[in-house]
Image (cartoon, rainbow, N blue to C red):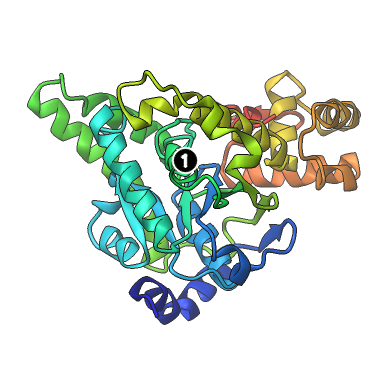
Amino acid sequence: MSSFHQAVCDVSGKIDLFFEKYYSSINLCGPELDATHYQQYPLMFACTHRSHIDYILVGYELHKKGFKNMRFAAGDNLTRLPYVGPRFTSFGAFAVSRDNGFERNYVRKLCDSVISMLDRGEPIIVFPEGGRSYSGAMLDLKNGILGAAVLAQAKDPDRDVFLVPVAVSYELIPDLPYFDLLLKGKQLKKKNNPFVKRIMGSLFYFGADLFAYLPLFLNKARKKKFGNVYIDYKAPISVRSIVDVQKNRNENARDDFSAHRFSMQQVSSYLQKEFFCLYRILPVHLVSFLLKRGNDTAGKMETQTEPLIEKLRENNRNTELVSKLEPAEIVKQGLDILLKQNAISIKKEIVIRKQFIIDYYSAAV
């Protein structure tokens, strides 16, 4: 048994207790996955990225489905954190540099490393948005680490390399209240800033995540604090079903990575559309969207939920949950989530207290 798989097995009881304590429910939604069958092939799960919880949440749910020796890409802002980083690495995390992610040589070496993992039969979880979305909107996908799936397919055209699109929707996330601090740190720690600013930036940048997650690790956060989570996924699809890697190869390119750039772009485009359709719209998304547009009473919002849902449905958005709820229940659930975060206050009218939280949820619509 792999040391990564064993490390997860050793703490599975604690992980179960963690999710049972802090989340109301975790809902895995998609077709049945035959782990034994698909682990015979190179397999990459491509996931949206909203929270550091994504890593352990998606990985552990797949672990329970029977997938073994999972590896997952994690930003070095996480893997370098004291205590947390080494623990994540022991569970199968491999670091992705936040500073060197756009450098050609770094990306090629990273892809080579990922291909080696795929060849060893290690399923990979990647987050092709390239980082958490601090705005709440879907980010444009990066070709970099996704390129490993294309290169693995090109390496053996007759062998299927499978991709699984995954989208995770949260009612609440620990990171959200600290995104402002994190973004300040990100600006200050840029290489061209003076040394003192870079130090301050690093303190803000890494400190934001410590502030967000320390209460959980110290067992100080409230029970069921983070509500419901939905993990929606599609059936595995082979890279060669998405794109003709051999036909698209540029024979005049300077290296193998560049030769397959067009195929990488096509795969990214495919996944972007899948993410958009998979990401589950929740009541808090609708309520925030309507609040941002000046609807300051529950009654006003109730009259507009059904037309909004219908418009989203026409655009192939995932309205499975909200379509089953009455307008009054949608508004109630959405307002409850915002009240828990002190994002609003309610008297005669609804008053926005934390605009950035409203903006974040609204951006998902």
Q: Which amino acid does label 1 sit on?
A: Ala
Image quadrant where one finds the C terminus: top right
Query: For residue 214, what is the image quadrant?
Result: bottom left
SS label for mark 1: helix
Q: In which quarter of the image is the N terminus?
A: bottom left
x then y, percent, for residue 133? 49, 34
Nearer-the-camera pick, 213 or 92 = 92
Give the residue drawn at x 48%, y 77%. Answer: 12
- Whether residue 347 is visible, yes or no, is no
Vertical side of 218 occupied by 354: above or below: above
In-image side of 295 versus 292 (left or right): right
What is the tally of numbered marks visible in this picture? 1
Furthest toward the left, the residue is 195
Nearer-the-camera pick, 25 or 43:
43
Q: Quadrant of residue 290?
A: top right
Q: Position of residue 219 (x, y in %)?
A: 42, 69
Q: How crowded is mark 1: few (under 14 residues within 10 Å), some or many (20 or more)?
A: many
The image shows residue 7, relative to residue 41, as above or below, that is below
Q: Where is residue 267 in the image (x, y as percent from the top left)?
A: 56, 33
Q: Can residue 160 be seen in this view?
A: yes
The residue that mark 1 highlights is 154
Identity of the residue drawn at 40% across and 31% down:
180
**Residue found at x 77% / y 40%:** 318
Question: At which x and y percent is residue 141?
Answer: 50, 30
Say whether residue 218 is left or right of residue 12: left
Q: Image check: 260 left or right of 137? A: left
Work out whether residue 190 or residue 182 is closer to the camera in this orientation and state it: 190
For residue 81, above or below residue 334? below
